[in-house]
Image: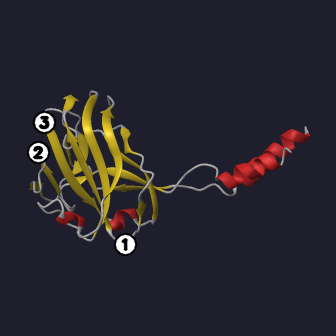
Amino acid sequence: MKKYVLLTLALALAGSTVAVAGVHEVGGSRTTNNTIPFWGIYAQMRWQIIWKQSEINEPGAVTKIEWQKWTNSGKAATFNNCKILLCHTSLSTITSNYANNYSGKTPVVVFSGTFKLPPLAPNQWWTVVDPTNFTFNNKDNLLIEVVWVGASGSANAMWQSLSGQSGWVFSIEPNPTTGKVIANRGQIARITIGPSGVAPTSLGRVKSMFR
C-alpha cells in the first residue's frame, strides 16, 4: 500500500513540472488544395512558403510540423534526396528568388534523406517533420523549404488557402535559383512549439522516492 501511495504522489509531483507544447494552426482557411510540393509525377522539386509570426506567436523549439490531407484518399509515395529546411525571414510575401526569401538569415536543414509519405485518409493530419535543431524566435516569420530529386508514387493533395497568405514558389528544374510564384496561397499546417511529456527532472524525482 505504501508504494501505491508513493507512486500517486510521485506522479502528481511529476505532473506539476510537465512541459506542455503549444500547437498553432497556420496558413489561413481551408479553401483549396494542391499536391505540390509532394507530387511524384515530377523528377525534382524546390518549393518555399512563409508562415506568419502572428499565427504562431510563441517562441521556442519547433518540434513538429503537420499538414492536413485534403478530402480524398492518398497513396504512399517516396521522395529521394529530400531536404526540408526552416528559416526565419523578415519577408511576408514570397518572391521568385529562393535565396532572397531567406532575407539574409541562415536556413537550417531539419530533415535530410529519403522522405516516405504514407497513405493518408481524408482530412488526416500527418507529420511532415519532427525538427530537433530549430528554435523559433517569435519575431520573424517562418519559411519552410522542401527540395527533392527523384520520386515514385502518386499525388497527395493537401489543404491550402487561396488568399491573404505569402504565396508559394516552386520549380521542377534542376538546381533552380528562381521559380514560379503562386500568389496569396497558404499551406495549412500545425506547428508544435516546445516539448511535451514529463520533464527529465521529474522522472528523477519519481525514481528517488522508491530508493
Q: Which residue is mark 1?
A: 139
- Nearer-N-terminus badge (1/3): 3
Which residue: 75% across, 54% down? 13
Q: Using the image, tell me which numbered label, if any, was put on residue 42.
A: 3
| Residue 179 placement, left or right of 82 | left
Q: Is residue 118 left or right of residue 38?
A: right
Task: Give the Cα separation between the discs numbered 1 and 2.
Answer: 33 Å
Q: Earlier in the sequence, mark 1 or mark 2?
A: 1
Few, some or many residues within 10 Å of mark 1 (<14, 14–19, 20+) = some
Distance (Cα) linking label 1 and label 3: 36 Å
In x, y percent, where is residue 40? 18, 33
Measured from the top left, where is residue 90 in percent x and y? 26, 71
Residue 196 percent across, percent down from the top left: 56, 51
Question: In terms of secondary structure, where does tag 1 sit?
Answer: loop
The residue lying toward the viewer, choosing from 27 and 177, is 177
Amino acid type at mark 2: Pro
Element under disc 2: loop
- Identify the mark at residue 94; answer none if there is no mark: none
Q: Residue 103 versus residue 15: which sits nearer the camera? A: 103
Tag 3: Cα neighbours inside 10 Å, few (<14), some, or many (≥20)? Answer: some
Q: Which mark is residue 174?
A: 2
